[in-house]
Image (cartoon, rainbow, N blue to C red):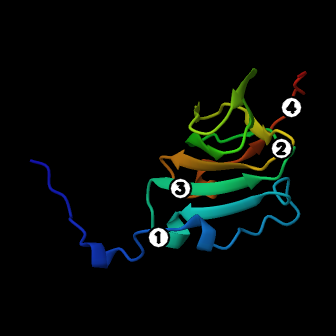
């Protein structure tokens, strides 16, 4: 028989997180320093055990370092703006409502189109932090548009 410990809402602290009132993370000195990255749900913030959720705002025409996560899958949801996402060797044009799935160990990167910022939500599955997801920078292949 399955037994579970049931938590009451008051036992787990913060339940609703707003990206617009969450302070940006400090990525100074990294390949993400030019982006507005906010950790919304994580081990540190809410005691999450198996998921991390964040928001990234890409300024118009910006991108980030090509990388992979050896210990987590990732899902990206485009909230506004347009751009591209590369998963493995494939490039995809993305816009509001698009959802990108990135398997563990799949090199990936993203960028916004010129003219407007792109806002995404990202979810790391199976881990509560970027440290536990792992982060490996990998060489990139430029996209010919």
Q: CA distance from mark 2 to mark 1?
A: 29 Å
Q: Residue furthest left?
A: 1
Judge the density around disc 2: few (<14), some (14-19), many (≥20) Cα neighbours within 10 Å. Answer: many
Q: Earlier in the sequence, mark 4 or mark 2?
A: 2
Depth-wise, is mark 2 or mark 1 nearer the camera?
A: 2
Q: Residue at x 9, y 47 (%)?
A: 1
Residue that mark 4 sits on: 140
Judge the density around disc 1: few (<14), some (14-19), many (≥20) Cα neighbours within 10 Å. Answer: some
Q: CA distance from mark 4 to mark 3?
A: 25 Å
The C terminus lies in quadrant:
top right
**Is the C-beta separation of discs 3 and 2 under 8 Å?**
no
x and y percentages locating residue 138 in the rendered image: 81, 36
Q: Residue at x 21, y 65 (%)?
A: 6
x and y percentages locating residue 83 in the rendered image: 76, 36
Q: CA distance from mark 4 to mark 2?
A: 12 Å
Judge the density around disc 4: few (<14), some (14-19), many (≥20) Cα neighbours within 10 Å. Answer: some
Q: Secondary structure at mark 1?
A: helix
Q: Nearer the viewer, residue 5 or 100?
A: 100
Q: In the drawing, does residue 7 fall left or right of residue 114? A: left
x and y percentages locating residue 105 in the rendered image: 64, 33
Depth-wise, is mark 4 or mark 2 nearer the camera?
A: 2
Residue that mark 2 sits on: 63
Residue that mark 3 sits on: 52
Depth-wise, is mark 3 or mark 2 nearer the camera?
A: 2
Residue that mark 1 sits on: 46
Q: CA distance from mark 4 to mark 1?
A: 34 Å
């Amino acid at each position: 028989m399955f037994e579970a410990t049931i938590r009451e809402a008051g036992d787990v602290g913060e339940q609703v997180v707003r990206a617009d009132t969450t302070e940006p993370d400090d990525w100074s000195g990294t390949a993400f320093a030019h982006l507005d990255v906010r950790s919304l749900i994580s081990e540190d913030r809410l005691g999450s055990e198996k998921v991390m959720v964040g928001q990234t705002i890409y300024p118009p025409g910006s991108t980030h370092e090509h990388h992979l996560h050896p210990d987590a899958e990732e899902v990206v949801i485009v909230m506004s703006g347009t751009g591209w996402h590369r998963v493995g060797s494939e490039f995809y044009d993305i816009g509001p409502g698009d959802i990108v799935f990135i398997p563990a160990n799949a090199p990936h990167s993203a960028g916004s189109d010129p003219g407007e910022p792109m806002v995404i939500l990202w979810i790391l599955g199976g881990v509560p932090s970027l440290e536990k997801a792992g982060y490996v920078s990998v060489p990139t292949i430029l996209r010919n548009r």
